[in-house]
Amino acid sequence: MKVPLNWLKDYVDVTLPPAELAERLTMAGFEAEEIQTIGGSWDNIIIGQITAVNPHPNADRLSLATVDLGTRQETVVCGAPNLNVGDKIAFAPVGARLINPHSDELEELKAAKIRGVISSGMICSEKELGISESHEGIMVLSAEAATGTPLSDYMGDTVFDLDITPNRPDCLSVVGIAREAAALSGQTPHIPEISYEETDSPIDEQISIEIIDPDLCPRYCASLITDVKIVESPAWMQERLIAAGQRPINNIVDTTNYVMLEYGQPLHSFDYDRIRGKKIIVRRAAEGENFITLDEAERELTRNMLVIADGEGTVAIAGVMGGVNSEVTGNTTSILLEAASFNAASIHYTSHHLSLTSEASMRFERGISAGLTIPALKHATQLIAELGGGKVAKGIIDVYPGRQEPGPILLTPDEVKRILGIECSLQQIVDTLTSLGFECQVGGSQIQVTTPYWRSDIKQAVDLIEEVARIIGYDKIPTTMLGEPLPRQNPAPVLRLNKNIRQSLVGYGFQEVITYSLTSLQMLSNLVPDPRPPEPMPLRVVKPMTADQEYLRPNLRVNLLAALAANRRHEEEGIRLFELGKVYLPRENDLPAEPEALCGIMSGTRVEKSWLGGNGLFDFYDARGIVEGLLQHLGVTANLEKSSDEGLHPTKQAAIVAEDNGLKVKLGVIGELHPKVADAFEIAEPVCLFEISVPALLPFATGHRMFLSIPRFPSTIRDLALVIDADISHRRVLDIIQSFPLVSEVLLFDVYSGKQVAAGKKSLAYRLVYQSPTRTLTDEEVNRVQEQILKRLTGELGATLRA
Amino acid sequence: MLEKIEEIKSEALKQLDGIDNVRDLESWRVHYLGKKSPLTGILRGLATLSIEERKAVGAAANKVKTLLEDSAGQKGQSLREAQLTSEAAREAIDISLPGRPYPVGHLHPITQTIDEMCEIFASMGFQVIEGPDIEWDYYNFEALNFPAEHPSRDSMSTFWVDTSEGISRSLLRTHTTSVTARTLENMEPPIRAIEPGKVYRYEATDATHLSTFHHIDGIAVDRGITMADLKGTLYEFARRFFGVDRKVRFRVDYFPFVEPGVEMAIYCIVCQGSGCRLCNNSGWLEILGAGMTHPEVLQRGGIDPEVYTSFAFGLGIERPHMLRYGVDDIRLYFNNDLRFLRQF
């Protein structure tokens, strides 16, 4: 909302410097986003009057204008088409600073000889003065402008651009801001009383008004002005409209805009003679009805939209925009002026469904008070009569089916203290509220507060408390710390687990990433070797911003692989990334499940290139090592089992499985990415990946564990080198060895196949640690168990001792 | 005999003096102090001597033996030191060579910022609570006093989600205040909760706007909580997060779920209040929205506003981080470029 200071001064005595006023408004909820100075650069520009216009002796398109400046006369070479003797204009002498319309830069005016004639200055356009973009001709001032006085005294101004929050539509107006400025500076606002002469012919004999849908139109007021001439509005009105960011059009449109900016109440003017049947009907639109709005666009309306109709059809979309069929034109002589109150939600709906917002709809959808209609209508009627030379029909029509008379709100100083934490005296509260136009009646320690008609936002005591705090100033409220009791805190095992996971992986050199929750169907389809959409279909947002952010991710790997591919374009070394975040899984008749998942990926060289050597690419066992380390850190025991994740390499993947009372629980998966999937993501090297479900992991990570005492008796170590069929897994050997209770630890320290062993065989070398918690083992005892182990390995797996 | 001992002594010491390696020292030790050494022979032969001679010779031989043992010990030490010195010189390294590379991991800057904020509020008794990203319209809007078709919703353009329930009921939450609505429903006062998470807005992307970002909301409910507590709590947060000397201001703002509504701003980090492009020449940077929880919102959460008062607040995560480190493009937080992430 642009508020020109000179306009504001009509309603309040502004004693504060502009910057200070802006600061107070900002602190009180009306943020001054910009303070614009009109005329700040008009140092020596003065008002002049054109006394003669003669042709330029050497140029057809140029004229020589003689300008009277009061104390002297100057002659100016000018190319403007609108030079008229007698007009008041803005004269810039040599040395003045003007905006160059070609470069938009402020430049100093130099003395110039134009086609042989010396020009002693310039007559300025609005653009050259920085008032508007208009540069078609010179700016013509009103006749009252005093010749010889500085232009900045006449039309210099300060304009506050205020951000008005949606709860204060009353302050989308100069009067509204004046009331605030008054309360904030200890002044009393003076809002003028409006009066005008009326003819003897009553308005209700010339037009009837009916509200069919009062739920959407609580109040409809109208006046009628006849014998109106459509002309330009006076300079003072144009200047104010321009300063407030509006473009002047004619006396009628300018008046409705002016009064809207003044009171915050939108108005609409109809050409009375074009109203068929001389009746106005406020009703819902017909479904599918077409209507051409003032911007000459055809709009399709629905039953949910309110229209203003005459005897034959729609003439305006209520509160949003009028129609061409009832528009005021240059030939209009009678104006039917509307000031109404419309249902805010309905206007919001209509404006958004038609993608049509206007200054009017913007105000109505915020819920302006029905009480604003009459003052605004009266001022506009008076102005139209005055500026258009019209006659006002007797009376105004006021149809008000939605009248509400809210009772007073009770407020006590105790309640103020309960919310704000400061003591305010009864008198202080009364004074503050009164300064904003509230009526206060004190009874004992209670105040009965009646809300002024323009405040549609005040509904209960707490709203009044905000008013008190706003005007006193938030800086007057002390700062205290929350006291006792400290609320009980609930254990947060998931947060702890997540923190532990993150810290472990960072410790292993992983970089955490956070990717978008949204992804594309194509990316998701590319997660399997022969691309196809995922099953079940992931959730979709209704109107995606872009195709690559359309579906809610059902897994983390999709975006992580994309992040890897993007980094690979500039990263040569090994990359370790992980994300711990939500995935979104659709559920019937409910919000989707949002389990948290962990996904880690490793790709490229295991060890950074260095003068110390060390090399090789990450493989399955790197991912497995990380998962084992992580699980160990979390105190989780899990095994790996065969798995069949389509997106992973068919023979280089495994499920991570934990056991809970004999029941197997899948925690996640480890594997190398399927080479075709890697291709689809444009990753040229093997990618190792692990995924773990946090909800599946949680019970194991938080399960109760007991301390194991540190062994008191010495251990004995034996190595066992076996030759065995190549297809027998380490797991089967391990299971047999671990079935002997005296074996406390088993370490596989070598796996070999090649020349040293027969074809189809491999050699596995184990280090076995024998230990008893109750005694020192003898060599004989250990040898006996080692023989038994070998016997079982030979009998069950065909293993032989390696020679 | 005593002369012989003296002779052994001087000969042994002389020999010892010339020794320059451990091996020779060992032979010397065997020769002069070993089982077959002359000195051991003398000590063994003591029995054949008269008592007086035995006393004198025994004392002299033992004294020399001790002397030789000590001297050998000293020699051993000095040889070891000389050896270490020469080895050290031989094995000298170029300390300017780079270290063996170990991978260094980092938490995402957003995780770090959330952790830091949660830690600050946890020290004031707030506990971390999380809620769903995909939310009912009710918790994101209705319960928070945002009626349907109200312009207060317009600043939070919404992604609606296509669920089996139809499209107008579930959405991607536009703020984590939705978690506050749930917290009020699920918990009994006294409550102090802090609620971090991802939020989504249907907004065109540029250097300062992104359709996905992070928020953290907070709520405190108890008897006797006032706006002074709100100011105190948030001021404490600002002191600890932005620095103890950073100026803070509280001004009136509007959010449907609070009344009175508050905006907290800090003195501009770039211009320190004198006005610059970052702060739009105001000298202040808006950091946080807050206020006393609206009675209707408490009521919808099943909390009696006549008995309890409450304050609530919410702020973005990316922006404070951007301000602190001078990051000029919010998109960097989701692009996951390692050259960015590794800096934090």
Image (cartoon, helix red, strand yellow):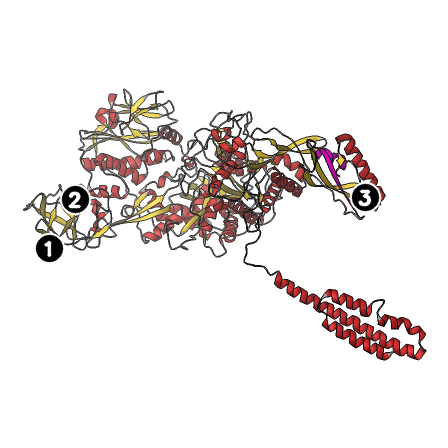
Image mark 2: chain: A
Q: Is residue B75 left or right of residue A386?
A: right
In the image, residue A725 lies in the stretch drawn in magenta = yes
How far apart marks 1 and 2 lie (CA) works out to 21 Å
Q: Residue type at mark 3?
A: Ser
Q: Is residue B73 left or right of residue A569?
A: right
Q: Let me know if residue B144 appears in the view.
A: yes
Do the residues at pointers 3 and 2 share their chain? yes
User: Pointer 2: residues within 10 angstroms few (<14), some, or many (20+)?
Assistant: many
Marks 3 & 2, CB-CB < 8 Å contact: no
1 or 2: tag closer to the N-terminus: 1
Q: Of the residues tagged 3 and 2, which is closer to the observer?
A: 3
The label shown at residue A72 is: 1
Say if B327 sits above or below B211 in the image.
below
Q: Which residue is mark 3?
A: A772
1 or 3: tag closer to the N-terminus: 1
Going 36% across and 20% down the picture, which residue do you hit? A287
Q: Which residue range is magenta in the image? A: A714-738
The label shown at residue A138 is: 2
